[in-house]
Amino acid sequence: MRLRIDGVVKEFDGKKVLQGASYTFEKGKIYGLLGRNGAGKTTLFNCLSGEMGMDGGKVLLEEDRQARELDEQDVGYIYSLPILPEFLTGYEFVRFFMDINRGRLQMDRTIDEYFDMMSMTEEDRHKLIKGYSHGMKNKLQMLLFLITKPLVILLDEPLTSFDVIVALEMKTMLREMKRDHILIFSTHILQLASDLCDELVVLSKGRLSSVPADLLRSPEFEQSVIDLLKDESHAENA
Amino acid sequence: MQKTLSTLIAIRTSSMANLVVYYLQKLPLVGKRIPDRLYAKLGAKKILSAAAFLLSLLGNFAGKLAFVGLFLYLPVSAVPDLSGDERWTLFLHLFFLTSFVAAGVSAATILEPKREKYVAVKLMRLSPARYMKAALAYRYAAYFVFLCAGPDHFRSGARGWRAGCHPARSGADPVADFHGISSSAAV
C-alpha cells in the first residue's frame, strides 16, 4: 500500500504555503515530516485528512496496483492539541464510539482489552477526560485507531510534551502499528525524528524532499537537515 | 435515526451526570466527600443521567414558558384599549414572528459551531447527515411540545381576552394576571 501525494497546492490569501508538494509514502514505515514553524506541516496534514480543501494536486492511495482517491475515513489524525469531550470519562467516550461504529467496524476486542493495550489503568479509564494529561489524551486518540484501523495515521507534533515513560510507550506503540499502516508524524525535534523514523521528509519552500537514508544515522545528519531548512526564509517573518 | 438519537441523548445525559458530579466535588465541605470513583459507578450514573435528562426537560419547558409569558403574553396584556379578539390576534402575530421569522434567521442551529458536532462527526465518525437529522428532529420536536404546552396555559388567559375579559381595560393588573396564570401553569 502506498500513499501518493502529487503536486498538492494550498494557498492562503495569495500566499502559497504548499507549492506542488509531491511524495510517495509506503506502508510499514514511520515517516518524520520535518519543517520549520509555519512551513506548512499542519496545512499538509489538514489537506490529507480532508479538514481543508486543496487548491491543486491530488492524493491517491494505491493498493494492489489500483489507485483511488484518499478518503477521509482512510485517515486517522492525531492533533497536537486534541479536542475531546471533556465531561465524559475515557471509558464512556470509547464505549459510545464503539456503539456508534458497531456493525461498520470489526471490533475483535472488548473495551477493557483495548484500554489494556494502551496501558491505561482501571483508575485512568474512569477519569473525566478533562483531567487527562496531554499524553493521556493522545493515547485515547490512538486507542480509537486500534479500533478503526485507518490506513494512514497522521500525528501532528506528538511526543513533544510527553514525559519519558509515556514517550517511550508511544514510540513502542508506533513501531508496532507501522506494520499495518502508513505513519507520518510531523516534528521539529531532530533527535526524535532520527530515533523513531525510518525515513525523513523535509517540507521546505512548500515542497517535500527526502533526506537520504545513509545520512539519517551519520554524524553529519543534524547539520545536513539544518542546511536543508536554513535557506527557507522564516515563514512567520515572511 | 432512532439509534443515533438514543446514542446522542445518552452522550448528553452522561456528560450532564458527570458535570453534576464534577461541580458537586467543587462544593465546600461536601465536595471532598464525593470520590472520583463515582465516575466509574455506571449503574448509579444511569440514575443520575435519567434525573439529569428529566431536569433538562423541565428546564427547557420552564424556559419556553418564561419566554411566552414574559415576551408575548405580558406585553399583549399590558396594551390598553384592545378588544379580546385584537389581543388574541396580536398574541398570535408576535408568536408567529418571533418563533418562525426572527428565530429562523437568528437561531440558525444548523450553522452553529459546537463541540458536540465535532465530537460526534469527526471523533466518533457519526455520519454528518444522520447526526444533524437526529439532533434537529430532537430539538424541534421538543420545541414543538414545549411551545405548544407552554402557550396552552396562556391560551386559557387568552381565551379570557376573547371572552371580553380585558385586564388592561378593566383596570386589572396584567402583571398580577400573568402571575396568576403562570402559577396555574406550574400546577
Image: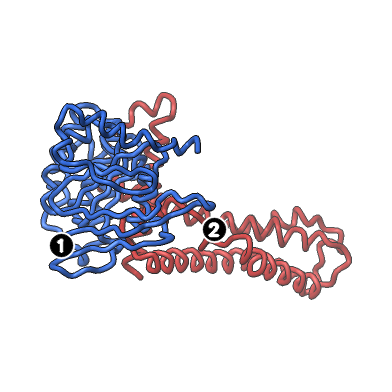
Q: CA distance from mark 1 to mark 2?
A: 42 Å
Mark 2 nearby-residue class (10 Å; few <14, some 14–19, many ≥20): some
For residue A145, say whether it is visible. Answer: yes
Q: Is residue B59 above or below residue A223?
A: below
Q: Chain of mark 2?
A: B
Side of A176 relative to A156 (left or right)? left
Q: Amino acid at mark 1?
A: Gln
Q: Residue at x 49, y 68 (%)?
A: B141
Q: Residue furthest top?
A: B29
The disc at residue A29 is none
Q: Which chain is red?
A: B
Q: Residue at x 58, y 65 (%)?
A: B147
In the rendered image, residue A222, in percent from the top left (x then y), is placed at 24, 29
For mark 2, what is the residue?
B61
Q: Residue at x 18, y 43 (%)?
A: A199
Q: Amino acid at mark 2?
A: Phe
Mark 1 or mark 2, whichever is nearer to me: 1
Q: Which chain is blue?
A: A
Q: Nearer the viewer, residue B132 or B90?
A: B132
For mark 1, what is the residue?
A106
Q: How many marks?
A: 2
Q: Is residue B145 above or below residue A41?
A: below
In the rendered image, residue A221, in percent from the top left (x then y), is placed at 21, 31
